Image (tube, rainbow, N blue to C red):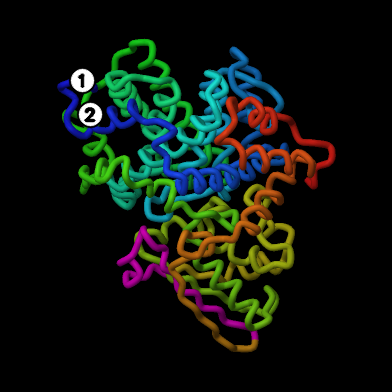
Amino acid sequence: MASPGSGPLTRALADHVAGFTAEAVPPEVRARALQMILDCCGALLAASDPKISTGRLIAGLAEELGGAPQASVIGHGFRTSLVNAALVNGTLGYACDVEPHHPEGVLHPVAVMLPTALAVSEATGASGAKLVAAVVLGCEIEYRLSMALGPVEQYNLGFHPSAVCGCFGATAAASFLLGLDAAKVERAFGLAGCQASGLMAWESDETENSRPFQMGMAARNGVTAALLAARGFGGPTGIFDHGHTVFRAFSRNPRPELLTEELGRRFDGIMELAIKPYSSVSFLHPGLDTLLGIAREQKLDIADIEAITIRFPSSGTHCIDNNPLKSHCAQYILPVALTREGLGVRDLFQDRRLSDPEVARLSRSVSVVADDELDAGFPNRYETVMEVRTRKGQTFSGRNAIARGYPEAALSEAEIRAKFERLAGTVAAPARVRDLAACVAGLWSQSSVSGFADLMRPKPDAGAAG
């Protein structure tokens, strides 16, 4: 049991993590988790492309620092300490902004949980089933905390929900894999509270490096919290219940009861995840679906379009209106998506406004309008109205709240596999891509994650598509 002075919320979460088992994961949740793991593997490998500075720089630092070879650094061919592996791989997970996301929680949980679970599983010799279960558990804790704090509440205070809540999810995943008892899990959560961080200040970083670094921080800090607690290191008690709680720090209108409501019976942290068809902030995805649908139906290309207006919930427009980050900039993402080449992961790290005159022209004619009427469903839905004006004076419009890839508009298995092959294929030869897909499909039955790690660790293959 957790400490008697911990309080009901902290005690419930600590007991849940300490008592969690792989057998507690229902078959449908297991299947969904494996789907999300495959999708995240594609994003992780794509981010290890040496042409993407984020992964190259942070992996280079980890290699220079050295450390016991406990866990693999994805796509870079070496092992390092499990703490540094979690940091590097967590950063890779969100680098391309194309990994699974949770629309309602405004989260990128698998980008944190798969690196966390892989590092600890590899270091401890855990089975594939335990890795998958750790991903499920961590995503659930992260989602529940984001909903209890309120995603908009966190944004309004300048915090990134994925970073703040991801630290607690990673702590849960690592604590489960390390086999901590409830009292140690409680201390681990307290230590997570001491480290939880992540300011939205990364929106000013045009390099796109500090944005995904926050997922790496969450993974690293969660692993560190669990490792310290395992060694008897002290930490705050009742982090969710009394004193300087998480709720006091990261919200002005929390709903703490959501943290434990139907705990162990619902797995919305995994089941409500969406798979991204586009490499960009998820806020733009309903609009991208609508814009590209109009272009297909009207047989328009970028040269035919005079101007675009995107109406978006007022609470989220600051994130997409002329954001210095290309991944979050409507004025950049929408025109690039209309080009013959479409939108790719490298477009977040190279500015096509400098090389494509049509992208540069149209980017100056994209307007983002804050629409209070669309706020009602935010952040559960990113309701968007798109208006397209052509050079011939025609106007076309559409409205959308559910993007392709949401559970309500799920991508087919063939589409998910094609996305994985495309992303993984940028650095891995076809045979390795096929072997990795088969490995993930059978991960639940594998006695060790070493084969999985062996497929994720190598540097880019000579036969990769590039």
Q: Is residue 361 above or below residue 184?
A: below
Residue that carries the numbered disc 2 in the rendered image = 11
Residue drawn 40% across the image and 30% down it:
21
The residue nearer to you, when weighing 131 against 58, is 131
Q: Is residue 279 magenta?
A: no
Q: Position of residue 375 (x, y in %)?
A: 33, 66
> In which quadrant is the N terminus drawn?
top left
Magenta segment range? 369-391
Whether residue 46 is visible here, answered yes or no, is yes
Amino acid of disc 1: Ser
Neighbor class of circle 2 (other Cα within 10 Å; few <14, some 14-19, many 20+) is many
Residue that carries the numbered disc 1 in the rendered image = 3
Task: State if disc 1 and disc 2 touch (CB < 8 Å).
Answer: yes
Q: Is residue 382 magenta?
A: yes
Q: Position of residue 234 (x, y in %)?
A: 29, 14
Residue drawn 59% across the image and 12% down it:
68
Q: Which quarter of the picture shows residue 275?
A: bottom right
Q: Mark 2 or mark 1: which comes first in sequence?
A: 1
The residue nearer to you, when weighing 82 against 444, is 444
The residue nearer to you, when weighing 175 against 310, is 175
Q: Is residue 372 above or below residue 50?
A: below
In the image, is 365 to the left or to the right of 183?
right
| Alpha carbons under labels 2 and 1: distance apart | 7 Å
